[in-house]
Image (cartoon, rainbow, N blue to C red):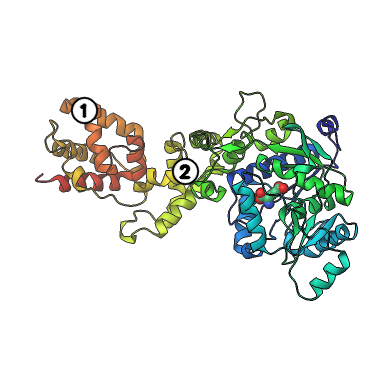
Amino acid sequence: MKSMQTLKNKKDSNVRVRFAPSPTGFLHIGGARTALFNWLYAKKTGGTFILRIEDTDTARHQENTIEPIFDSLRWLGINWDEGPGKGGDYGPYRQSERTHIYQDYAQRLLDDRKAYYCFCSPEELKEKRDAAAKKGLSFKYDRKCFGIPLEESRERIKNGEPSAIRILAPDDGTIEFDDMIYGKIKVNTENLDDYVIMRSNGLPTYNFSVAVDDALMEITDVIRGEDHLSNTPKQILVYRALGFSLPGFIHLPMILGKDGSKLSKRHGAVSVGFYREEGFLEEAMVNYLALLGWSYDEKTTIFSVPELIEKFSLEGIGKKPARFDYDKLLWMNGYYIRTLPAERIKPLIEKRVRDFLENADRSRIIIKTDEISERIDRIMPLISMRIKTISESISRIYPFFISVEYNEQLKEYFKNKEISAQNVLEKTIDSIKEIGNEEDFNSSVLEEKIHKLCEDLDIGIRKLTEVLRIALWADKVSPPLFETMAILGKDETLKRLAKYLKAIDGK
Ligand code: GLU
């Protein structure tokens, strides 16, 4: 067994770590955190990061439940050195392709009398389980089939009798291991069940296949969620029975939702794919995931990937459960949108705009396809300080691309107000018309004109711009008004002012 000391000092490139998701159709936030910590540790130490798919559950073994996991990992930049699509010397990397290996190792255990065939029917086992539960005891198999000689078992199997294989848990021993996070763990083997390692359908159970694979793939450090801590003694039973040497164990603290219970769908979206769709940036996602259970100095929150690789250490992982805080993630995403170079953000916004226009009513589109890119360049400085997700950008900027419509509420908005919206609109139109060609139609000229108008009409700037804002944006909030007018251009600005004037006519 490795001591804490050797683990801590490990800086060589023999490090081999793995992420071993089951194909669930999506990458869970918790899984992504596990993958990231393994990956960072491999990068930090110059080790190898392995991806292994735990798809022994045939009913769920379908490509479409694996692909989204690959996609999300790639999106986060968590690339694997060995695994599906990549190969490696320790493959295959899908458990469904390794059945013969598990069968082979199970045979070895049978031959050594460290495992035995079990012919108990599911009904019989259920009865025993229920009886134990009634007494408030945890179920422990009574070894009814342990005494059956191997030859007799093989004969019964030949005759078609269904059988599982159970591992023999020694009666009188202890299993002890050092978890780097949770410390020394000691379990009396008496408390371990002779659990099933191979099912009657010839497929392995999780605790068996995971131990065989981790050993054969020469995993040096098993880094995974705390929910697997209780499985570790069962896996060590397999290591011992097969004479494999133990890896280091590092169980990561749980991730809780805001209310303090285990993070689940009840707390909102838990799939990485959802956040990608929502317009979160991978930089923010990786940064945020890294802080779920790890910290550098308790105060630094912003880390680029190279900084994470440089600063990450297993020692920085705490025992205390981490909290998944959507608002903090949102804040962090906003931070990255504000601070990353425009070339990084622009294509994401442009894609959303183009998708939006694809689905928009053609008659409302006010821009030519080849003008979209340039318009986005002009819009970006107006919104990048304000938006928190890329998808949010569309709701803030779509009137730069399609004409506006006023609802009844907006049409009546100025009805009983002191200000005469008609007068403001008419005078603004006159004033704006005076501005020469499109080059002069810029925000500073517009600002000057509108301020002058306020003086002439003896109206406060806020009151006046409220009329213009609603006319131009069909909303009470808009990007900065003069820049907005400049980007829309003289024709479109005049068109909208006139359109609102008409819309409120007679109201
Ligand atoms: N397939 C397991 C899971 O998805 C991984 C277990 C492990 O890392 O040992 O939870």
At 32% from the left and 40% from the top, the residue drawn is: 485
Q: Is residue 391 above or below residue 358?
A: above
Residue 262 in the image: state x and y as whole percent.
55, 40
Q: Is residue 46 above or below residue 195?
A: above
Query: Which is more toward the observer, 401 or 371?
Result: 401
Q: Quadrant of residue 29?
A: top right
Give the quarter of the figure containing the N terminus: top right
Per the image, label 1 sits on a secondary structure element best described as helix
Residue hosting label 2: 377
Q: Tag 1: residue type? A: Cys
Q: Is residue 424 visible?
A: yes
Residue in front for this viewpoint, 209 or 47: 209
Q: Nearer the viewer, residue 68 or 266?
A: 266
Say the numbered circle drawn on residue 454: 1
| Amino acid found under the numbered disc labelled 2 | Asp
Q: Is residue 97 left or right of residue 267?
A: right
Residue 400, label in figure: none
